[in-house]
Image (cartoon, rainbow, N blue to C red):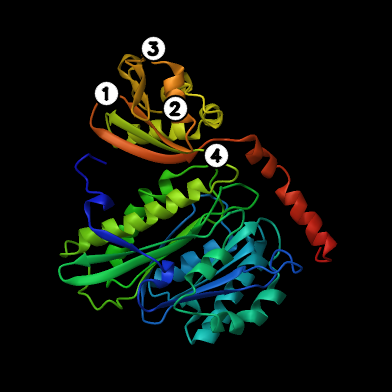
Amino acid sequence: MSKASSTAADFPFKAITGGVTAPRGFRAGAIACGIKDPKKVRLDLALIVSDKKAKTTACFTTNRVKAAPVRVSAIHVKGGDARAIIANSGNANACTGPQGITDAKSMTRAVAEQLGLKMNQVLVNSTGIIGMPMPMDRIIPRSADLVAALSEKGSNKAAMAIMTSDTKAKSYAIEVKCHGHKFRVGGIAKGAGMICPNMATMLAFITTDATVDGSELKRATQAAVEQSFNRITIDGDTSTNDTVIVMSNGASGMPVIKSKAPCTEVFRAALRRVMVELAKMIVRDGERVTRFVEIRVKGARNYKDAKAVAEAVAKSTLVKCSWHGGDPNWGRVMHAVGYASARIREELVDIYFGGLCAAKGGLPTGIPVKELETVTTKPAFTVTVDLNLGEAEYNVYTTDLSKEYVDFNSSEYSAAVHSKRQTGLA
């Protein structure tokens, strides 16, 4: 991406409350089904519905192992007119064979019957433990209750119902003015890590009352995902269930947004803003993380090189460990730059922590470590790598790596299996 590209900050957006129900014509709700543990009462089944006809598109995980709901939703979304999303936490419905596909379809069918929709107008999402059969006896009988829970103020409950290892619900919405019209974009997300085979899938559901042409909605969504959810890393793992869904119902009454329409760039920037804010929330809520770090690479020969360097630094275990200790170890950053699949010249590389230059031309600047630590001991800071070879830039949002993170992810699957046996479900 060039420096000339516009960003969401270039447009006057007003942050509002309401998440996925901030845009007009959308309702959401959630109920407790005891999906992971019938003894625990917590919201774990969510529903989002457009009361009007809608254009819908989605992006799914690139993992070759795809969960049943991903496979089913990928087929249903091809129609482009989905109007409902059912999503559960506590069970990923992944690596569950043909029965998993059957169960995912059953969830869409049950909701469709309650809402008077076609089965393929319902998308299904799941997040939780991999390899466990879905407790359909707790889900299907509650479909009527789920629909009854729908509300124009139900976004927060839906956001809570899709949480797994998240510590807080993630929601964001904005109102946008464009050529005498107003439209809204809102969303909810979940994710605190992308850990295979344990829980913490990334899901994001975005709604808008703008009137968007189907082709433009797909283009705008793909671009926004690339600039947001595809630029975050907590642990470097890609889940079996990662999904981003965007629905546009036109309830704002504004003219259709399509390629090169008056409000096209504004809509693209608005969609990008919502996704970026949700993506940042996911990183900040990473499993047992203590640092939120933005990696900025500039001066690369091309986009591909900038991306390669940013991702190498953001995913380096050594680098992430140094951040956890508040250690401004620019040498570890340099070594990650060096093994990235990008053309670099060591003698041209500059590295900054915040606004402080730790290395210039590949050599230490001599700045006191204590000064650099004033940046790296903060809960959020920026690391900038200037390759001084061109104009291309790329940024990634990432975290540190803590001992608590390792402890947290050491026994999740075993704990779930034991719990299931104890409840007589094995």
Q: Give the number of callouts.
A: 4
Residue 90 shown left or right of residue 62 in the figure: right
Q: CA distance from mark 2 to mark 3?
A: 15 Å
Q: Residue at x 47, y 23 (%)?
A: 328
Q: Which residue is denoted by mark 1 in the rendering?
A: 388
- Which comes before the other along the chain, label 2 or label 3? 3
Q: Residue type at mark 1?
A: Asn
For marks 1 and 3 on the same chain, the one whose residue lies earlier in the sequence: 3
Q: Earlier in the sequence, mark 4 or mark 2?
A: 4
Q: In 3D space, how far apart are the residues under numbered discs 1 and 2 (Cα atoms)?
A: 26 Å
The C terminus, quarter of image: bottom right
Secondary element at image label 1? loop
First along the sequence among labels 4 and 1: 4
Look at label 4 and name its amino acid: Thr
Expressed as whole percent of the image width and height from the top left, the position of residue 231 reads 41, 44
- Residue 169 position in % (x across, y down): 52, 60
Distance from the alpha carbon under mark 3 to that under mark 4? 27 Å
Residue 374 image label: 2
In the rendered image, the vertical position of residue 311 relative to residue 104, given as above or below: above
Numbered disc 3: secondary structure? loop
Res. 366 mark = 3
Q: Amino acid at mark 2?
A: Thr
Give the vertical position of 301 relative to 158 (above or below): above
Give the structural element (helix, strand or loop) at label 2.
Answer: helix
Which of label 1 and label 3 is nearer to you? 3
Which residue is at the front of the view, 117 or 173?
173
How far is disc 4 from disc 1 in space, using C-alphas? 31 Å
Q: Can you identify the residue that label 4 sits on? A: 290
The crowd level at tag 1 (other Cα within 10 Å; few <14, some 14-19, many 20+) is some
